[in-house]
Amino acid sequence: MLRKAECSSQALDVPVSQAQRIRLLLREGVIAAQMLVLVSWLLIHVVLYERATSVAAWGPLLISAALALLQTYAQSDRIWRFSGLAFVLVVMVGFKLLFTEYPLLHQRFSLPLTVLAVVGASLLIRGSWDYLVVAVLTWVLIQPYVNGESDDRYFLGLFVVFSISLGWINSRTYIRALENTLDIERYYRNLSETDHLTALYNRRALMERLETFVATRAGGFFMMIDVDDFKSVNDRFGHGVGDEVLRVLAERLKAMAVGHCVGRLGGEEFGVILDTCDARKACALAQQMLDAVRECREAPVPFTFSAGLAPFAPGQDISEILIHADRNLYKAKRAGKDRVHPGTQDSHSRQ
Ligand SMILES: Nc1nc2c(ncn2[C@@H]2O[C@H](COP(=O)(O)OP(=O)(O)OP(=O)(O)O)[C@@H](O)[C@H]2O)c(=O)[nH]1
């Protein structure tokens, strides 16, 4: 299994839980189902039964509308689950009040309504136990009409068992399918964003983070890193040792750049998005990374890198930032390698 791309910047990658994603995917369907229930409720009470002034009609309607709104805007999973569950129960309490007032209606429609509610609720409720609680409570609350004959009671029992089982199967199948889809999506997103050798972000993913960073932050620094004389490492010690050097460098950068974002641009080139607008801090951090690499004992052979820093301002063009960092990296190489060439807003504007 591919390791997840490593980015130490929390703010750039706000984690979205699977529960949150499922809520977002279900949102539209849940809103549509709730609207349907509320409109049906209005039609039954106001048009069919002319109960426009009845508290028993408006009370459950208003409470269930409030619960629907709560579920639509719920941020926490607990509130989302609770409001969906409560919505179904409040609607059923509303019907119970209606049936108490109109016994004939209870006789004719309580059974199909309960079956419909128990099966339909499977969309509004995520979680097997939540669903079972609502389904059982719905049957207990409505207690559909049956005459005293044993055949009728036998059939009612079948309806109870089958409707709950069907709703439960629907709910499980639906949520499992969503979970599987999200797992597959996460796997392939990881695959497309991760550098296979170092498990850092690959170039595309790092550039996406840089775009987000430039669009949302007050500024920062981009650090372009290139291993010195890497060709000779490969030539003298073999490609395997070269790979190990890259892996060790990735580990070092990751450990040093906590709170920032690291990726491999390709070959022996790496990039770090530094979450600071302070040029002195950025230079100090870059220098610390270089020192840490120089002193690194895990590497199969000693190695160093050169780096160029480029400051960026909000909304700046990404290619401009990369060109600037690359120029400074080139200057560091020309000045004798094993060093960081700082970039400042002033030096940038002079380019
Ligand atoms: N082991 C290994 N080598 C790689 C990888 N990607 C690129 N290279 C090698 O990296 C070397 C880069 O060499 P050059 O671009 O000449 O740079 P250099 O030798 O580091 O020289 P300076 O940049 O001037 O310090 C090439 O020999 C590539 O084959 C990789 O994934 N693994």
Image (cartoon, rainbow, N blue to C red):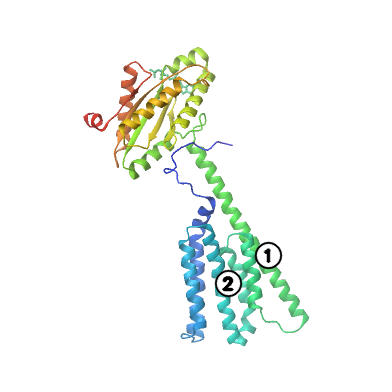
Q: Is residue 242 above or below residue 132?
A: above
- The residue positioned farthest toward the right in the image shown: 150
Quickly name the residue at label 1. 165
Mark 1 or mark 2, whichever is nearer to me: 2
Secondary-structure class at tag 1: helix
Earlier in the chain: of badge 1 and badge 2, it is: 2
- Three-letter residue code for mark 1: Ser
* Residue 230 on image: x %, y %: 44, 18
- The residue positioned farthest toward the left in the image shown: 350
Q: Which residue is rendered at x = 36% and y = 28% of the image? A: 284
* Residue 303 on image: x %, y %: 45, 18
Q: Is residue 5 left or right of residue 114?
A: left
What's the CA distance linking mark 1 and mark 2? Answer: 19 Å
* Residue 238 on image: x %, y %: 52, 16
Q: Is mark 1 within 8 Å of ligand 1?
A: no
Q: Which residue is rendered at x = 56% and y = 49% of the image? A: 181
- Three-letter residue code for mark 2: Leu
Please tell me which residue lies in front, 163 or 97. 97
Q: Which residue is rendered at x = 62% and y = 83% of the image? A: 106
Secondary-structure class at tag 2: helix
Q: Is residue 250 above or below residue 335?
A: below
Q: Is residue 263 left or right of residue 150?
A: left
Around disc 1, counting alpha carbons within 10 Å, would you say few (fewer than 14), some (14 to 19), or many (20 or more)? some
**Which quadrant holds the N terminus?**
top right
Quickly name the residue at label 2. 89
**Which quadrant holds the C terminus?**
top left
Please tell me which residue lies in front, 317 or 249. 249
Please tell me which residue lies in front, 165 or 141. 141
Circle count: 2
Q: Is mark 2 within 8 Å of ligand 1?
A: no
